[in-house]
Amino acid sequence: MAVPHGDHVDYAHDRHLHRPHDGHVDECEATGHTRHDGHPHQHGAGCGHVSVPHSDHVDYVHDGCRHAAHEDHWDEH
């Protein structure tokens, strides 16, 4: 599954996101913690956004970003 991510496209495979880079493939993981405030929509089954299994959780592709539930808010990857 292709997932837009910033200035490139990641590919979901075995619960990881991979990014082609200079003839090889890198893991593409977010660093740090970027809180996405002002997001009243609750992602989940049937929400209308593409779900991407990622590590131990599910991300949702929304407006060119991946959103992941974190405590009482959504993080942006």
Image (spheres, rainbow, N blue to C red):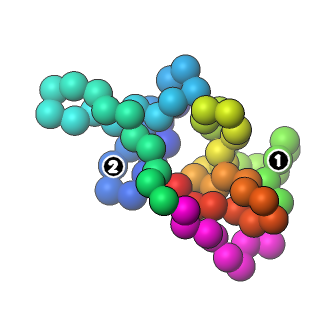
Which element carries disc 1, helix, strand or loop?
loop
Judging depth in this view, the residue of 44 and 54 nearest the camera is 54
Residue position marked by numbered label 2 in the rendering: 8
Residue 71 locus on image (x, y percent) = 78, 59
Q: Are marks 1 and 2 in contact (CB under 8 Å)?
A: no
Q: Amino acid at mark 2?
A: His
The region drawn magenta spans: 33-41
At 75% from the left edge and 66% from the top edge, which residue is drawn?
73
Q: Residues within 10 Å of mark 1 (few under 14, many from 20)?
A: some
Q: Is residue 64 left or right of residue 73?
A: left
Q: Amino acid at mark 1?
A: Gly
Residue position marked by numbered label 1 in the rendering: 44
Residue 40 locus on image (x, y percent) = 80, 72
Which element carries disc 2, helix, strand or loop?
strand
Q: Main secondary structure of the magenta part?
A: loop
Residue 33 locus on image (x, y percent) = 55, 62
**In the rendered image, the vertical position of residue 49 relative to residue 21, given as above or below:** below
